[in-house]
Image: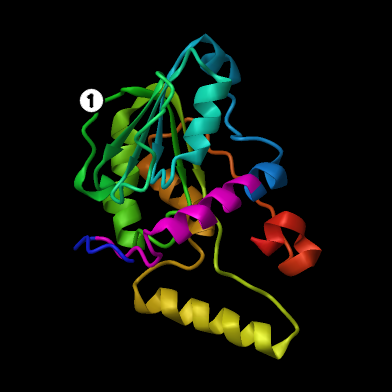
Amino acid sequence: RYHNISNSQYICPNDDEEADRLIRTHEALKNFWGGLFHSPVEEKLRRGAQVVDIGCGPGVWLLDMAKKYPKSHFVGIDFSPIFPTDGLPENLEFVNCNFLDGSPFNDSYFEFTHQKFMIAAYTEEQWEEKAIPELLRITKPGGWIEIEEGDAAITSNGNSTQRIANAIKNYFKSKDLNWKIGESIPLLFEKTNAFSEIINKKRTSAFGKKGGITGQE
């Protein structure tokens, strides 16, 4: 099952099978990075902060965070309501909306704004003209915006893998999606002149068993 949102290029399904894949990917990345986030917000979260996760999917990152930091309040938003609705902790809520149309939050509301894997959802124009301005609007001065993105740049000496890599790249281009958006985001941030500090962390992983849990997911 796929979405029918007119202004979104999101190319992945929004069904139970996709939700299960996203949950497995979350666990793999948590193992890969050794934690749930990279920003220096640990103390803020322990004291109590307002946190939002954009494009939260099934909400698994938020469920982990809400359990670990009970004094903070967490909000997840996604245009596909595949997030849970029952049995939620008191410090977690979900909102069904399309971030590209704007979000229902006041200016400077969140101390920690988190977004992950929108490579398949935003065109580069949408990143620059809609997503990043909205991320800035809802984040408090002195707060942190963390974006975790992969890219579709696959390198291999094998002909079969290279054919797959080329097919993925061409498909992204056909949808006007930047298949290497991870490299572009720091530059897009710099163009805003709104950030006092930009930190870029990069890691690569092998595919298949050589890449461990991450490579297999």
What percent of the width, then of the height, locates residue 137?
A: 28, 32
What percent of the width, then of the height, locates residue 4?
A: 22, 64
Residue flagged by tag 1: what amino acid is it?
Answer: Asn
Q: Is residue 141 visible?
A: yes
Residue in the foreground of this view, choosing between 160 and 44: 160
Q: Secondary structure at mark 1?
A: loop
Residue 38 within the magenta-colored segment of the rendering: no
On screen, 72 above or below 198? Answer: above
Residue 18 within the magenta-colored segment of the rendering: yes
**Residue drawn at the location 24% of the way across and 37% of the way down:** 103
Determine the image quadrant of residue 40.
top right
Residue in the foreground of this view, choosing between 184 and 163: 163
The quadrant of the image that shows the N terminus is bottom left
What percent of the width, then of the height, locates residue 10?
A: 35, 63
Per the image, the residue denoted by label 1 is 106
Q: Magenta-highlighted stretch: main secondary structure?
A: helix
**Residue drawn at the location 25% of the way across and 48% of the way down:** 98
> Counting other residues with Cα less than 10 Å from the Cα at mark 1, is it few (<14), some (14-19), or many (20 or more)?
few
Q: Is residue 201 visible?
A: no
Bounds of the magenta span? 8-27
On screen, 202 above or below 146? Answer: below
Determine the image quadrant of residue 213.
bottom right
The quadrant of the image that shows the C terminus is bottom right
Determine the image quadrant of residue 77.
top left
Find the residue positioned furthest to the top. Answer: 47
